[in-house]
Amino acid sequence: MNKVVHYQHLKNIDYKQGWDYQTQLFERIIDLKIENRKQGTTHPTPNYLLFCQHPHVYTLGKSGTLEHLLLSEEELRKRQIDFYKINRGGDITYHGVGQLVGYPILDLDNFFTDIHRYLRFLEEAVILTLQEYNITAERIEGLTGVWITDNGENPRKICAMGVKTSRWVTMHGFALNVNTNLQYFDYIVPCGIQDKGVTSMAQELGTPVDQAVVERKLLKQIAQLFEMEIEELVAV
């Protein structure tokens, strides 16, 4: 098992550019796994973890419906918001500046072959990071992601998740609202859930948050939970 994970911060990158880069890494790992199987070799498969932000964009997962996008093509253009139908699970979500987006591109054969556990570990890393800011977050049974509730009332999502897997290799990931402009969620039905809200760390704390610090804390939590050995790559 190769526990080394190459960490890279892509800064504020166009969504399609980031998606293409993810796909390139994802397919590289899968191709190596196929080659190992065909040739009987045991070349170690690499793992990657990408952090970034995106300019305003809505993405619609495979199980989503266009009815959950509340803007027309013309309105999207006027507001300079991109839109993509993509190959992850889940419904529609928003990405924008002030949001920490994470893309783990991992060969789970290097860790554990359990998608449920994989998602719970990502959620737990976010929950533990938020605890460091005295924000109490939790899971809601039957719903993926991380939520804030007031003793079970007024649930609002602070971190969305959606993944794609093939041959136990993962791509896509999570989006944690740090200083996100929540107004952009008003133009969609976030994750297809109509009876729950959306929030951010800044909203909960009443003040902007240093996103670079959040990134370091979350990276540490992910590394500890997955028992990763992080190798940082030069930022793009």
Image (cartoon, rainbow, N blue to C red):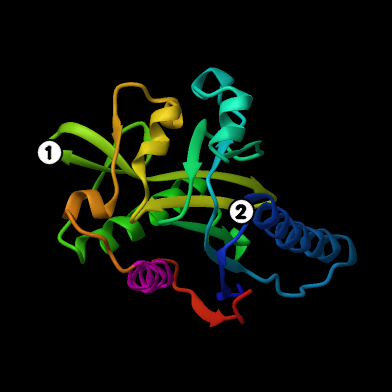
Please tell me which residue is depicted at 37% across the width and 46% down the height of the picture: 181
- CA separation, marks 1 and 2? 33 Å
Q: Is residue 143 left or right of residue 1?
A: left
Q: Is residue 215 magenta?
A: yes
The local crowd at label 1, few if under 14, some if 14 to 19, many if 20 or more residues have their Cα within 10 Å, is: few
34 or 75: nearer the eye? 75
Q: Which residues are magenta?
A: 211-224
Which residue is found at the position 29% from the left and 32% from the top?
Answer: 197
The x and y percentages for residue 93 are 48, 37
Q: Is residue 166 above or below residue 105?
A: above
Q: Which residue is mark 2?
A: 170
Q: Please, is residue 213 above or below residue 120 in the view?
A: below
The residue that appears at 49% across and 22% down in the rendered structure is 70
Can residue 175 be seen by looking at this rendering? yes
Left or right, 107 with reference to 70: right
Given contact means CB atoms under 8 Å apart, are the residues at marks 1 and 2 in contact?
Answer: no
Q: Callout 1, which amino acid?
A: Asp
The amino acid at mark 2 is: Thr
Is 132 or 198 nearer to us in this picture? 198
Along the polypeptide, which appears first: circle 1 or circle 2?
1
Which residue appears farthest toward the right when viewing the image? 39
- The numbered mark at residue 150 is 1
Q: Could you tell whether 87 is left or right of 189 in the image?
A: right
